[in-house]
Every structure is written in structure tokens, then in C-alpha cells.
Image: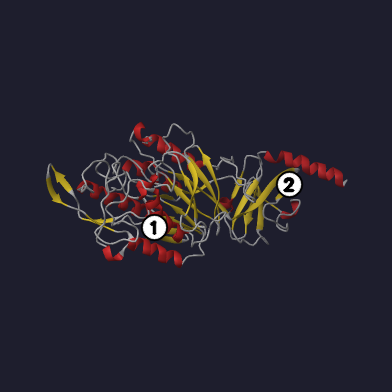
Amino acid sequence: MLKRFNILILFCIVCICGTAQMTFTLNGIAYDEVAERNSKGFTTITLPAGTNLSGLVTGIKVDGKTVAASQVKPNPMTTTWNYGELKVFVYNNKAYGFRIEEDVWFCGVFISDCHINQGSSHDGTSSEDMTRIMNNIIAMGKDGSKKVSFTTEGATNIVPKASIIFCLGDIDQDKGDDGSNGSHDNFLNATAEVAKAAGVPFIFIAGNHDLSPDYWTGDDPDYGVTSSGANADNKTISAIVDNNSYWNGTGVFDENIQYFEDNSKSVDFQSKPFTFKFKDVRFYCAHTYWFQKLYKGTFLKWGSTTLTKATYYAPDGVISALNNFVDNHTDDASVWMQHFPWLAGSDCNRWWLDQNDKGLYIPTSDESAYGSNISDIAYNNATQANKLKKDPLSAIMMKAAGRTDGKVQHFSGHYHRFSDRTYTSTVNSSNKVHDYTVAAPGNTEQSNNAYIVLFKRGEGVKEVVQAQF
């Protein structure tokens, strides 16, 4: 008889995918917010980490009608639940499968270099295509299908859904939608507004096409940010701050976004790198890179006439603020990001040294521990880039928790192609930064255009997978 019952249960499990549905009333938890019936016919209930499973089920319905718990075999209200275990309940000769998962895992999606409406020369993405990509990211996994499969132990059954989305800079045309006004409306409408409507946190940072570097091209040793560029810089940072403020206001973060600034230069332009905590993981977000220089005033040329000149300042105050913050948050599992990669790209080191394509550089007016006051930095010099920028930053980053295989986890863009490389400090070989560079959505050389990242609460990055949306 027992053998026949086991055969019946196996047969019922095969029939789990029928149209009838069993639902539960959960103790203090809204069922609709945590339960999802997947494509295999059983329902996964994902509960907040640490939920007490004793007395979890307080009521049962089948197709919306309440049924007595005693009529369901075994009784869901007295069943001993265990995370990850498939439970099958039978009512009126129909089987209903349930699995309870602990919400210790979550997924983020990283995109970069959208260059909205900037054309094929920049691997640009149209507003329409970017909106489609965002909608596909937001819809990921909601039909129960797996976009990617993870191999990390304990996460192989996860159906990835986007808990948070990041864009790592170069968001649209140079300094804004029409190249001058800095409004960024096309980018914001195709990304940030789509995310807001869906309730999925969206964080973006600025790249070199969004913030004026010292130079674009040219031979003039004094040519710095223009007045229109300064205006666009302010609008770019305002757009980022406004977006951050919106998500702060929703209460989705464990800790609100806060900025790293040099308070002694509060009236000058600063790129305002920032940090926040989400699902017990801390994110550190720079823009072009952590050593972006501060400046005051604008430089404008009309023919050969110099009207005003910008004064550039060393980023030391910002880096000190970052260093002090990390010292006080060493137990936080950390994930880092900036626009410039650590190693990808033939001109990688000149980006870190703020040089244009001719090797020109504007030194800061004040002294700097990071070489910003040096006027004769050698063009694209790896040794100087490492000594002045990468090694000091990697030392700060290594103080925070959340390393995987001994490596700090970092994400970047700018290169327009995927790259997966590890930077090893030239001062301390134990300081290693694993940098994942994400490809541009409009890049036709690589069909994939985003990273899906598996995070674990309190531990950080566990797995990174390329995906196409």
C-alpha cells in the first residue's frame, strides 16, 4: 500500500503543472509579495532572511476558496518546513508543489556606455532600444524562466530577477541630449523613469562624456573646461543627485546615499562620488574615476582672447573622506565601481592620469599625494598610473570586507567591450582588484551587453555572468 501511495505522489508531482492553484496565508507576510509559481508548475516562496518557519502557514485556499487544513495531505499548517526542500501537498487528488527559499541572494544588472542617440561611431543606442533593454531587464525572470543559470553553491535554483540596476557612465551625447544643454532627458526617460515606474532601484554614474575632463583633443596646454562644459557638468551631477534622492525617498536602501566631498572646497565643482547600503551590501560609486579633479571658475576662449581660466584642485580631500569612511565600515561587504577600467583598453593609463590624446595635462594649483600637481606626467605611463592612483586606491579598497578569492570586486565601463581582469598592486601583491568591464549595449562586435551579478547578503559578489537583453 505504501508503495502504491509513493507511486501516486510521484504521479501527482508530474501533474503539478495543472491549472488549479493552491495559495497560503502566511504569518505576518503578504503571500502575493513573496510567492511565485514558476514554469515547472510549483511555487517558490522567497522569505526575508531569518524568517521563523515555525507556524508560517496560517490558512489555505485552492483557486481562491478556503479549504480546511485537515483536508490537505500533509497538513501545510503543521508541516515542518526547511529552506530549499520541495514539499508536495495533495488536495482532491491534485498535487501542489512548494519550495521555500531564504532571501539571502539578490541580483544586480550592470550596463554602461549607452551613448543615447550618439550614433554608431560611439556604439550609441537609440532611445527606443534603450527603453526596450530596460524593460527586458526589469521583466527578467518574472515569467519563471531563467535568463542565466548560476553555479554558486546554494544558488543553482535561483531564477534571476533584477533587484537593482546600475549604469556606469557615458549615458548619452556629449554633456547632454543635444551635445550642449546637459539635460540628459533622453537617457533619463529611457532608463531612470522606466525603473521608477517598475519600482526597481536604478543608479547611474557619470563617464568622461558626461563630465568634462581636462581635455578632449588638441595642443593648447591651457585649454580646460569651457563655460558650457561647466554648465553641463553641473547638470549631470544634479541629474545624478536628483535620481539618488528619489530612491532615498522610497526607503529601498538599508542606508541612504551619502557623498564624498572636500568640505574645504564646498563652493567648487566636485563630481561627488557616493556610497549606500542595499540588502546588507555596501556599494561605492565613483564617476569617471575616484581621482576626478575639483575646479573653480570656467575657461572660455574667443579667438585668441582669454576671458577666464579655471583653477583645478587636487582630489586629496575627497580621497581622505573615502579613506576615513572605509576605516569606519571595514565590516561592510563592499562592491566598487567607476567609469574607467583598471586594465582594459590600450589607453587605460592615460585615462587614470587625466591626459588627452596628445598627452597634455593640467596640473592642480595645490599639492597632491596622488600626482595631480605634477605638470610633466609621462604619457600613458603604467608605472606612474599605478604608483599615483591605482596602488593607493587598491589599498583603501582592500580594507573593506566582501572580497572574493582575496580580490576586491569592481565594475567599470568606457572600453565598450567585455573584459575580466585582475589588477595586482605593485606595492603589495596581496592587494588585488577583480575588475569586470561591461560592454556597450550598442557594440556590434559582442552580442552580449550587460552583466547579471549574483550577490549574497552580507557577503557581496558571488558570480558574474554576461547576458544579452
Which residue occupies the foreground of this view, 380 or 398? 380
Q: Amino acid at mark 1?
A: Phe
Give x and y (percent) for residue 237: 31, 52
* Residue 438 x, y percent position in the rendering: 46, 42
The residues tagged by marks 2 and 1 sit, at their Cα atoms, a distance apart of 53 Å
Circle 2 SS class: strand
Residue occupied by mark 2 = 91
Which mark, by number, is residue 403? none
User: Regarding mark 1 in the picture, which secondary structure is present there?
Assistant: strand
Q: Amino acid at mark 2?
A: Tyr
| Residue 210 appears in the rendering | yes
Q: Mark 1 — residue?
A: 274
In-image side of 320 versus 152 (left or right): left
Q: Residue furthest left?
A: 305
Residue 276 in percent (x, y) is at 44, 59
Measuring from the top left, give residue 216's x and y in whole percent.
Answer: 27, 42
Query: Height in image: 342 above or below 401?
Result: above
